[in-house]
Image (spheres, rainbow, N blue to C red):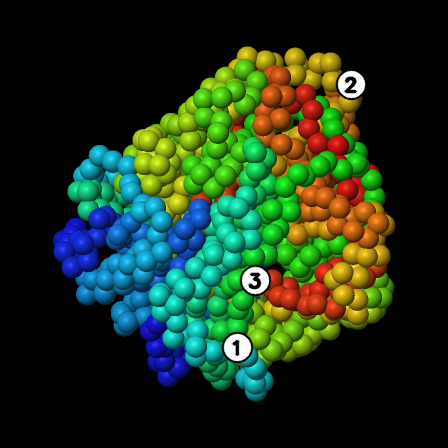
Amino acid sequence: MVALKQEKLLSTAESAVKSALKKGAAEAEAYVVESCSTMVGIERGQIAKSSRVVDQGLGVRAIVNKTVGFSYTNMLDDKKALEEAVEKAVSAARASKPDKDWPGFPVERSFPSVKGGFDKRIVELRADDLVEIAGLILDSAEATDKRVIPVEGGVSASYGCGAVANSNGVAGFDSGTVIDCGLATVGNDAGEVTPVCYELNTERSYDIDPEWVGREAARLAASSLKAKKVETKCITVIFVQTALQELLSFTLINAVKADYVQRNQSALKGKIGERVASELVSVYDDGLLEGGLRTGKFDGEGVPHQRTPLIMKGVLRGFIYDNYTAKKEGKESTGNATRGGYWSTPSLEANNFHVVSGSKSNDALVDEVNEGLIVYLLQGAHSSNPASGDFSVVGAPAWKIEKGEIAYAVKGAMVSGNVFELLRNVSGLSDMERQVGALVSPWVRVENVKVIGK
Amino acid sequence: MKDVLSKVLDFASGKFGAEYVEARAQRLFRTMLTLKEGRVEAARQGLENGTALRVLVKGAWGFASVGSLDSKVLVEAVSDACKMAEAASSRLKTPLKLAEAKSIEDKVTLKPRKDPSKVSIEDKIDTNLSLNEAIMSFDSHVKSCTIDYLDLTGTSYFMNSDGSYIEQGKLYVWARAVATAVEGDVLTFSREEIGSTSGYEVFDVQTPESVGKMVAERAVGQLKAKKPKGGTFPAVLTPNFVGVFVHEAFGHLAEADLTLSGSVLGDKLGKKVGSDFVTFYDDGTVKGAFGSYKYDDEGVPAQKTLLVKNGVVAGLMHNRETAQKFGAKPTGNARAEDFHVEPIIRMRNTFIEPRDHSLEEMFEGIKFGYYLKSFRGGQANLDGTFQVGVQEAYEIVNGEVGKPVRNASISGNTLETLLKVDAVGEDFELWPGRCGKGQTAFTCDGGAHTRVKEVLVGGSA
């Protein structure tokens, strides 16, 4: 992998800020990123491809008369292109409309130290090493069950770094690594095809278990065979992290964003201090969580990350903010301005959305269910109503629980409801946390959920 | 560009003995706007240069992407790609091969009536402000409105080791308006998109006023809506809704990479899977449509691909690799979002072919059912289970459109549901959308009004 330099990134950002001020901007901010990602891919039962993507770029925000302009380029080695990007940010600001509420860029605050975000061993991994890891996934999937097709998957090792600078003196640099391995599988037996099953393991340090990924992905597909339809009724549902992540991404996580709240798009508006969930439920947004996938020193605007209480024992305690939404309420940003890349302006996103674990084992959570469903993935979570939290999705793969035992796979079971009703009806959380995307959580059990079968 | 790419290709074939090499260099210029209740969050514009290099060495794929058009950087990157392919080939069981494709030399110049790169940012802001105005001023219950706008222009320079060299202009204009309405505890949500490959003139047809009214009217109308009953009911689907159903429920299963991965269509080629009314196409040649282009990202001409004819599976969507496996011809469905990623099989403009039922005939005889007017997302699964969310629907009571319902979705098994299609209308519409399969592709979905005898409706009442 290429070695990326702190001084170069930070100085590129700082000189872009200076140049924007010189060109007439009242304020300016620059964000510079570089990343390198190496991947080895599994396709239909074999390792068949490998890729390396090197990416870099600069994004500049310039303010003229409370009007925001932005421009980007990926040509970091081309002085003229960099100047042009700055120029375009200023000209975009001149062409746009002023925002009377523009609060200015964040001011300098000291950055926290974070743990577990970088591992040199990941930087040093080569394609051959990744082929070996992908081989472990594939071998253990194949050894688990012959009726399973390893459809797609692989392993990727990424290294990225970024710098933010603004005209208020903010200057930050951070770097991190991620290793990710996963496998999608389908069970196929005598003409019966299962839904796609998926298992993954993503870490910031070189501490993954590819054999578990392969084995578990195959086990899920094999046990999805011989699926039956279920009756339509209200029963208990256990959401495994992978399913919960899909559901919450399109509902609850939006509802705690200050932008949604301020703009009447959140059902949680005006409910601070009120009971919004079962008292078993506590949620933080934690940008400092050790080894968290979205852990880092600061956000996309150079505001320090922090741990923000959102729901404590069922009571709504707070929302997440970027600088703009925070200043609107006279508050400080919670460090949740996220960059999609150099081509985008910051947007308000959760860092590590941490649902705090409970005290029961996964097994105990299942044991106590008389009649229920355990759901691993959802189909159609993005079709939820992001404002009201209403959803109507397919749980697949999912299994029926009868008298404390996982009885059989179900097919085509729809799960319908409202995420806030779901939160109030939580009856148990397991003691095993894991991270899937922005979510860190245990298994979550919910009572009285509408399941629509035949 | 031609000389640079040809040098890079020669190097990969000469030094690494690559069986196939392909270079896709791009210059891309984007303008983006986000408006929240008429406040312009940031006017954004930017320029990117980059090249995607893809090679086949010892039967395995190697891919490299760099943000450069410089020959030295590209030679390094293609070497990287060849070494990556070699590493991957070490555990290969079946070496990959590509179907034949005619070598093509062409230069595709776009001739928009209004080139978005020549429209000023001020004008673009004004257009989007009128869209915002049409939504926010529609009714006092409308409380928020987010508009995203994107235009993308640029050029792709494609060369492969089979002798093709294609310069192709790229042009996309897209906008999405989202509104919420509030009354008491009820929050509704409404979304509409505009998308075109013809030019900025799309706003002359889909005017900000008309699109804005549609978005706001729905958000307000949904305030009075009730929850749907969960269960199995007959349904009439609009072109907007049936398009997404065709795309999600059938289209993805007919993407040959997914068919090979074990989708339920695996053994259905030439077999009857739907009623006689069911004829599906995926067509990359509809002029100006959001999913149209002349050549795909493997240099294969786009075409009108027949997927189902009168209920019988007639074909799949291919790239050169899957076409070889099926002994079929590539269909021009290999698309890459940009130079950061490799081409994969994607849909273009996907639709159900119109027949001759009138709308009245379709509603006739339905005692109780649902009129599914506009979708909100959808997702397919390889086992044939589909889900399509609904942002606007009405009850059908005794053959008449009745009260609105909200936050429904439909689901079922594709192969069972296609057999239950018992009427297809004579109208035709295509609606722009974006499809996610790891990468985003611009597409259209549509067709004619379609009736399904029964489908599972998810609701919480």
Task: Using the numbered discs, state the Cα–Cα distance from disc 3 to disc 2 in whole angstroms.
Answer: 53 Å
Q: Foreground residue, A94 or A278?
A: A278
**Disc 2 target residue:** B367
The local secondary structure at tag 3 comes to helix
Seen in the image, is A423 located left or right of residue A155?
Answer: right
The local secondary structure at tag 2 comes to loop
Q: From this view, report whether residue A44 is shown above or below residue A189.
A: below
Amino acid type at circle 3 is Trp
Residue B405, position as x, y percentages in the image:
75, 35
Does residue B352 appear anywhere in the picture?
A: yes
Does residue B431 appear anywhere in the picture?
A: no
Q: Foreground residue, B7 or B209?
A: B7
Residue B394, position as x, y percentages in the image:
72, 30
Q: In which quarter of the image is residue A264?
A: bottom right
The chain carrying label 1 is A
Residue ID at (56%, 49%): A145
Task: Using the numbered discs, state the Cα–Cα distance from disc 3 to disc 1 in whole angstroms.
Answer: 23 Å
Residue B137, position as x, y percentages in the image:
66, 45
The chain carrying label 2 is B
Q: Do the residues labelled 3 and 1 touch (CB within 8 Å)?
A: no
Mark 3 vs mark 1: same chain?
Answer: yes
Question: Label 1: how many residues lie within 10 Å, few (<14), some (14-19) or many (20+)?
Answer: many
**Disc 3 target residue:** A212
Q: In which quarter of the image is residue A446?
A: bottom right
Q: Foreground residue, A74 or A376?
A: A376
Which is nearer the N-term, disc 3 or disc 1? Answer: 1
The chain carrying label 3 is A
The local secondary structure at tag 1 comes to loop
Task: Using the numbered discs, state the Cα–Cα distance from disc 2 to disc 1 in whole angstroms.
Answer: 60 Å
Residue ID at (47%, 61%): A136
Q: Residue A117 carries which label?
A: 1
Residue ID at (65%, 73%): A286
